[in-house]
Amino acid sequence: MPDTPDHTAGPARGAGAVPPAAPDLLRTALADARSPRVPELAPYAPERPFPWNAPVTANVSELGAAIDLDRVLRLSLAAPVGTPGRLRPVPSAGALHPVRAHLLLGQGCSLPPGRYAYDPRTHRAHPRGPVPDGVPPGALVVLTVAASRTVAHYGHRAWPLLLLDTGHAAAALALAGAATTDAQVSLDTDGSLLSAAAGLPDAPDWQNIWPGTEPELPLAAVLLTPPGGPSGIDPPLRAWAALPRASAPTPQPGADTTPPCELAAARHLLHHVAEAPGRPGGTWHPASRPGRVTDEVLEARRSAPPDGLKCPPGRELLARILATARSVRPDGPDWTVAVGGATPALYGAAPGGPGLGVRATGDARPTLAHWAAGQQWIATSGAVLLAHGCREDASRATVRGSHLVAGYAAGAAQAHATALGLRSRPIGSWQQADLGAAFGDTPGRDWIVHGLALGAPSTAADSPVTTEATPATPPTASAAPAAPSGEEERP
């Protein structure tokens, strides 16, 4: 999820400072992430070796295995062959790839039952512990984030990006698994239960239990079960959580035990929003592939360079991508698509049927470029799909769900766009992007959470919604001067 990594030098924050106390913590942090304040200058944070170093197990399918983990992980989380430094086809915030996967496997998988940590660079699973008795067949994948590199790069803007990237990773797993398994996704299971199921310490206790290692914060889970099996079975999280804690990662130099203020605050925020004591088991939604998405499409999807996104897609194609984003998870944010050209407008779903309906006229793309950390290429992109909602005083469950669902739905929409021959690029960081206020509504209630730039190949025969023209002054433009174009980090 690219973002402009602009930094300014500033006073260093005190190490180990205590973040603000709830309930004002979340609202203050959300307002700060959405503010024009740029991240402070921080030293480069290099990637550390994969910390789970038990003897590796090759992901080789066993005869008769119903769930081919080699295939699922190769199509979703594995580092693509021939692209050094890139962990996934779709980059995370700043291409820092903070999401890790812990595999909790019963019978019927192409690996023996047990707990594993998955290394995307080597495409290998590292055993971490045994399986509990009575676990049904299938694979339960707990997705965690290691926040340090992303926070070093994006500072106070990092924690929403970590949520978005987890949503993208969940979508990648679900899309890869849905073709051959019954796939379900939970984006609201209690984080402490996910930690225990994965054999990890709870976030506040991590560095006391495993000093010298980097905490991982669980945010989502994906369940893959053999096709045609019994329906309505609760994921066996409690059975996994009842086991003793699994093997520890290897301590590494630089995996600080007293983190700087912004890193401590980001970890505290993510643990806070992941708490769901009222419904610890979460809600589980069945996953399916959008039409025309195949394994070949999943292998081919890439985040396009900005220069390849200038040709507007056609109205019918945009309507189909918008419908995919809206239908993947109806409990998430709302969706709108901005298009420029001779008759610029913002489109939503047409009332009462398929197609696009005009929400507002005028070219919003220059304003979107200003809001998206000054990424000026957005002003000339073919179209921009926008997830928006998450009011400024949203509850922690809404903040978590809005960002995870936005990333999840954008991941599904990007795969569908690839299947339709379109190019795309996620846009993660947004500042002052109060879309509702720009429409004249009450400020603070309808913020842009995520974006997906879309463009048709220059040879596309599909008739575009518009043709490129000199952008008009957007009716929704901020009175603030345009942010300078930053150097975008590209995978």
Image (cartoon, grey):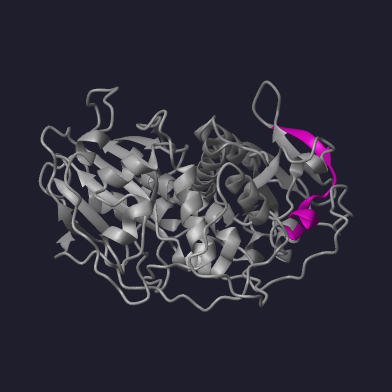
Q: Is residue 407 above or below residue 89?
A: above
Whether residue 354 appears in magenta in the rendering, the answer is no
User: Residue drawn at (43%, 40%), measured in percent from left and top?
Assistant: 275
Residue 451 visible in the picture: no
Residue 265 in percent (x, y) is at 52, 57
Is 427 placed left or right of 235 in the picture?
Answer: right
Number of numbered discs on residues: 0
Q: Is residue 332 above or below residue 386?
A: above
**Residue 27 percent coordinates (x, y):** 63, 45
Residue positioned 69% across, 71% down in the render: 486
Magenta span: 356-370
Q: Nearer the viewer, residue 315 or 176?
A: 176
Q: Viewed as shown, does residue 480 lie left or right of 310?
A: right
Residue shown at 15% from the left, 52% from the top: 129
Left or right: 187 with respect to 119? right
Q: Nearer the viewer, residue 141 or 376?
A: 141
Which quadrant, please, contains the N terminus?
A: bottom right
**Left or right relative to 416: residue 428:** right
Residue 15: x %, y % from top left: 50, 70
Q: Is residue 100 visible?
A: yes
Spot occupied by residue 348 in the image (x, y as percentages of width and height): 71, 35
In the rendered structure, does residue 365 fall within the stretch colored magenta?
yes
Q: Is residue 220 above or below residue 17?
A: above
